[in-house]
């Protein structure tokens, strides 16, 4: 470990605690609030968050390029983007505080945290692409069997 004492602050030093137990409870409360927000949004699904920011471009080579590069984010429902961001925030804070990455050297922190974030983003991208493909297959009835 880089330091012999645990850092008792969260949110980049904005909130400080007296001991480790209080810090654990503080992080627990923060993660609980994020989870409650996710659950409430998942149950109610506000109509304003269920329509994409913009529709795909039509016509031409540059429209096709724009659709390829922008489709994972711009054409996605804002609610899906909110879920992805909140999940990444929770994963970051679990790794940072409960796995004590805050107390490790800079190189180890970066290798663990950034690798995990990259892999989660890649997994989300693949799931969205494959999920859209399966949705289109079922919607257009191109297949005659269930898989």
Image (tube, rainbow, N blue to C red):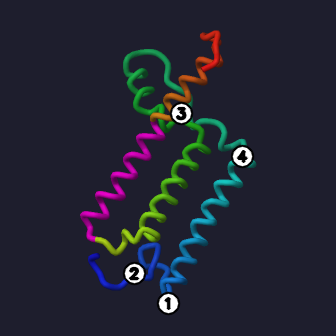
Looking at the image, do the residues carrying marks 3 and 2 touch, with CB atoms under 8 Å apart? no
* Residues at marks 2 and 4, CA–CA distance in whole angstroms: 39 Å
- Asked whether, in this view, residue 57 is left or right of residue 105, the answer is right
Location of the C terminus by quadrant is top right
* Residues at marks 1 and 2, CA–CA distance in whole angstroms: 10 Å
Name the residue tied to disc 3.
75
Looking at the image, do the residues carrying marks 1 and 4 touch, with CB atoms under 8 Å apart? no
* Residues at marks 4 and 3, CA–CA distance in whole angstroms: 17 Å
Q: Secondary structure at mark 2?
A: loop
Task: Please tell me which of labels 3 and 2 falls first in the chain.
Answer: 2
Name the residue tied to disc 1.
18
Measured as percent of width and height from the top left, residue 78 is found at 59, 43
Name the residue tied to disc 4.
46
Name the residue tied to disc 2.
7
Q: Secondary structure at mark 4?
A: loop
Task: Please tell me which of labels 4 and 3 falls first in the chain.
Answer: 4
Q: Which residues are magenta?
A: 105-125
Measured as percent of width and height from the top left, residue 89 is found at 49, 59
| Residue at the (65%, 18%) spot, across then down | 139
């Amino acid at each position: 470990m880089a330091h012999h004492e645990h850092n008792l602050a969260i949110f980049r030093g904005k909130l400080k605690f007296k001991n480790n137990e209080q810090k654990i409870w503080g992080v627990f409360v923060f993660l609980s609030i994020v989870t409650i927000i996710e659950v409430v949004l998942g149950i109610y699904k506000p109509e304003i968050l269920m329509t994409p920011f913009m529709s795909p471009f039509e016509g031409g080579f540059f429209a096709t390029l724009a659709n390829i590069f922008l489709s994972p984010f711009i054409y996605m429902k804002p609610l899906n983007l909110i879920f992805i961001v909140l999940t990444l925030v929770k994963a970051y804070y679990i790794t940072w505080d409960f796995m004590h990455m805050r107390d490790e050297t800079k190189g180890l922190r970066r290798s663990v945290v950034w690798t995990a974030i990259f892999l989660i983003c890649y997994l989300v991208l693949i799931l969205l692409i494959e999920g859209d493909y399966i949705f289109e297959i079922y919607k257009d009835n191109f297949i005659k069997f269930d898989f």
